[in-house]
């Protein structure tokens, strides 16, 4: 924070949606620090010039750049420098998690930039017995040019960025099994600052805190599932999905904790 992380993240919110389509900057916030991770489809010299012009606060130089394929970049985000010491195939085919024994995720969407004062509180949020991080993924570019009803994913031009809350812990502490609540307390704090009616969520960060299916007569309950279904897909898209489900799987043979239910016949 003493190097201007709060100011940089505050500016980042409004900067990234307007960046060129071939440049994306995401932020990982952990332990009162912000790590800016950039993907640029081009060479180092071009992106350094762009970053110096658009985001001089980061002080990007050619030494900060690593030229690699998109596949290696994707692996680098998750495995870091391990991609330089192990075969890429071995890393990508490893089905064990690199995060830790216990992981919990939640998500949000932000429409209006948070103030500097709000970010200060977030940076100083206590971790407690676990270790928490926020991952801020920007929208804009092609994301904003696809209409909300074109495909099931609805979070488009009206969103600045997505927040992924991640909490990691080992499960055993001096008092026995512990499930930390860093993620729950911060998620509650964020309520006034994120999307509403419904509060948006990203389906690939499945959040069972929003509820699980209620099965009646072997079929999942439409009214129960609206709670998270509309958060993941938006009200209109969720209803369209339930109509499709009724056509292709009316008996609801394929179901899970938060699967799309068939729309009931009236």
Image (cartoon, helix red, strand yellow):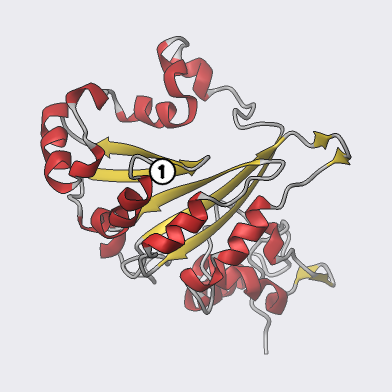
**Percent x, y of residue 131:** 63, 39
Residue under numbered circle 1: 1
Residue at x 29%, y 63% (from the top left corner): 144
Residue at x 49%, y 50% (from the top left corner): 123
Residue nearest the observer in this picture, 146 or 198: 198
**Percent x, y of residue 198:** 54, 76
In the image, residue 222 above or below residue 152: below
In the image, residue 218 above or below residue 91: below
Q: Is any part of residue 153 visible from this angle?
A: no
Name the outermost residue toward the right: 176
In the image, residue 220 above or below residue 9: below
Name the outermost residue toward the front: 2
- Residue 50's image quarter? top left
Residue nearest the observer in this picture, 144 or 37: 37
Residue at x 62%, y 65% (from the top left corner): 188
- What is the secondary structure assignment of the residue under circle 1? loop
**Percent x, y of residue 232:** 54, 65
């Amino acid at each position: 924070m003493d190097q201007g992380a709060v100011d940089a993240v505050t500016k980042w919110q409004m900067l990234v949606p307007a960046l060129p389509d071939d440049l994306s900057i995401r932020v990982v916030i952990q332990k009162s620090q912000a790590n800016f991770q950039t993907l640029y489809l081009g060479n180092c010299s071009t992106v350094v010039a762009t970053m110096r012009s658009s985001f001089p606060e980061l002080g990007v130089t050619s030494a900060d750049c690593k030229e690699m394929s998109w596949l290696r970049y994707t692996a680098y985000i998750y495995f870091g420098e391990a991609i330089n010491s192990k075969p890429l195939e071995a890393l990508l085919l490893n089905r064990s998690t690199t995060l830790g024994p216990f992981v919990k995720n939640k998500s949000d969407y932000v429409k209006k930039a948070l103030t500097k004062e709000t970010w200060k509180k977030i940076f100083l949020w206590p971790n407690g017995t676990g270790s928490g991080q926020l991952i801020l993924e920007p929208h804009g570019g092609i994301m904003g040019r696809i209409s909300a009803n074109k495909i099931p994913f609805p979070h488009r031009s009206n969103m600045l960025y997505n927040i992924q809350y991640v909490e990691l812990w080992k499960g055993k502490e001096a008092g026995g099994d512990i499930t930390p609540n860093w993620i729950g307390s911060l998620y509650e704090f964020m309520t006034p600052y994120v999307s509403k009616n419904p509060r948006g969520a990203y389906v690939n960060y499945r959040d069972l805190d929003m509820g699980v299916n209620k099965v009646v007569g072997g079929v999942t309950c439409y009214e129960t599932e609206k709670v998270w279904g509309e958060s993941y897909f938006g009200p209109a898209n969720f209803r369209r999905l339930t109509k499709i489900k009724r056509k292709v799987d009316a008996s609801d043979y394929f179901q899970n904790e938060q699967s799309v239910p068939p729309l009931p016949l009236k």
